[in-house]
Every structure is written in structure tokens, then in C-alpha cells.
Amino acid sequence: MTSVSYSDQMISNVKRSQIGVPAPRTDAPGKIFGTTPFAGDFVMPGMLHACVVRADAASAKLVSLNIEKARELEGVACVLTAEDLPVVETCAEAVGQKQEGPDNASRCWPASGSGITASPLR
Amino acid sequence: MRPRIKPCLRRCAIWAMWKSNAGVRKADCGACAVLVDGVAVDSCLTLAWMCEDTEITTVSGLGNAENPHPLQAAFIDLGAAQCGFCTPGMIVAAESSLRKNPDPDEDDIRGALSGNLCRCTGYVKIVDAVKHAASVMREEERKS
């Protein structure tokens, strides 16, 4: 009995074969009519926006950082610098080794799971 | 910073946003394109006040599932959308160019879409879809 029902199932599957048959993408309409949300469209409760500030001089040496004015700006929740990253001494949990750096800094680039120690400003 | 229609429309391009935040304000990818009075513009570069008394159309305004625009139908039928991030800009840019040139050859289409980047690199199907939609639209025009 079992083998009969299996073969019936197989026959109906063969008749429904999709090989060589064009099939519309099920996700296409949402993307084409503009209704599919992308990562940038999501709004989460308490969501903050981040902005990376890069040096405006190429091939320069970073001597010091002054972030006080940025911290005092209205609406700024927190300003993170390299000092807020965890110190990673071994590369076992890091993504790679830095070539050089100050003595008190990490010797390795932290991995995404390493965690950031800073909390938002009060 | 003056408000741009890009954040107003909430359909923006990561690259363009990055560029404009960096102060370059130079459209890179065309994913945020919208029609302003029927002409495709990059919304990341367009200030809101520049659009006063104009009609702004996004891809959602061109058609919907019940009544799709020929370009939208062609993009679905020919599998021209992959990740879909560039798709609204592609359709809007194609619509803008087909209004000027309803019978484009492949070079014309590639030229019209040269400001729109597809990082899935699915350009062949996009060009095929625009070519197909153009013939459908010409046929509709002929009948009407």
C-alpha cells in the first residue's frame, strides 16, 4: 500500500516539474511596486542614527581628538572613539592584527562580537 | 542643511546618502530616482523647495499589482529585479527616457540607464525588460 501511494505522489510531482518552466519570482511584485521594506526603511523603538566622521586630511597622522563640542550638540546621544572599543590583546577573537599603534591600544582589530564598553551620555 | 526630497520620500540610496553626508553631494547610483514633472531626477540631490508646485511620482505611483505600468509588468515577467534596491530607480529612469524616445535601441536604453547602478549586475534582463515594455507601450499607443 505504501509503495503505491509513494508512486502516486512521485507521478504528480513529475507532472508539476518546474525544470525548464519559467516561474515568476514571488518577491518581485513587492520590489517592483515599491512596497518591500529594505533595511533603511525600518524604524525601531528608541532607534538612534549613527554617523561616521572621517579625517578630512589624507595620509595625516591623528594626533588628538576633540569631541567635546560634538558631545554638547543637542540631540547627540553619544560620541564613540577608538578608546571606547574594548582592548583586544590576542587575536583569537579578533579579525586581524594591527601593524602598529600606541602602547595602551589594542593590538588587534576587535571583532563584531567584542562589544563596546561605552554607554550613551546622560 | 536644507531638507531634500530624499528623506521626505524615504526611498534613498545608501551610496548617495553617504556621499551627500560627506559633503560631495554627487549622485552615484540613481537608486533614489523619482519623476519630477515626468523627468527622472536623483532625489538625494534635489532640495525640497526646488519641487514646489511640481508633481513627484515614485515607482509606487506608476502602478500597482492590480494595474501595473508596462515597465513594472515587464520587470516582473522577465525577472529584471534581483535584490530590488535599484529597481525603483531603474523603472523611473526608463519611464523618463521612454517618454522622450518611445522606440529606443539597446544603446539608447543603456545610455538612459547609465546613471543607475545595479550591484547584482543584472543589467541584461533590465535592458530586455525595458525593450519589451517599450514595444508594449508603443502597441498601446498605436491602439489608442
Image (tube, rainbow, N blue to C red):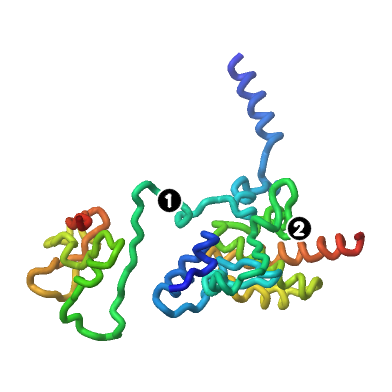
Q: Nearer the viewer, residue B16 or B109?
A: B16
Q: Residue at x 76, y 62 (%)?
A: B133
Q: Amino acid at mark 1?
A: Val
Q: Is residue A58 left or right of residue B95?
A: left
The CA span between labels 1 and 2 is 32 Å
| Chain for numbered disc 1 | A
Q: Position of residue A19 (x, y in %)?
A: 66, 45
Give the residue at the far left of this rendering.
Answer: A103
Q: In which quadrant of the rendered image does the C terminus of chain A lie?
A: bottom left
Nearest to the eye among marks 1 and 2: give it. 1
Q: Amino acid at mark 2?
A: Pro
Q: Quadrant of residue A4?
A: top right
| Chain for numbered disc 2 | B
Q: Position of residue B81 (x, y in %)?
A: 61, 57
Give the answer, above or below, for where A3 lies relative to B76: above
Q: According to the image, label 1 marks what residue?
A: A43
Q: Secondary structure at mark 1?
A: loop
Q: Are marks 1 and 2 on the same chain?
A: no
Give the answer, above or below, for where A16 lies relative to B82: above
Q: Residue at x 73, y 74 (%)?
A: B106
Q: Is residue B91 left or right of residue A68?
A: right
For disc 1, the neighbor class at 10 Å (few under 14, some 14 to 19, many from 20) is: few
Q: Residue at x 23, y 67 (%)?
A: A72
Q: Is residue B101 left or right of residue A107?
A: right
Q: According to the image, label 2 marks what residue?
A: B70
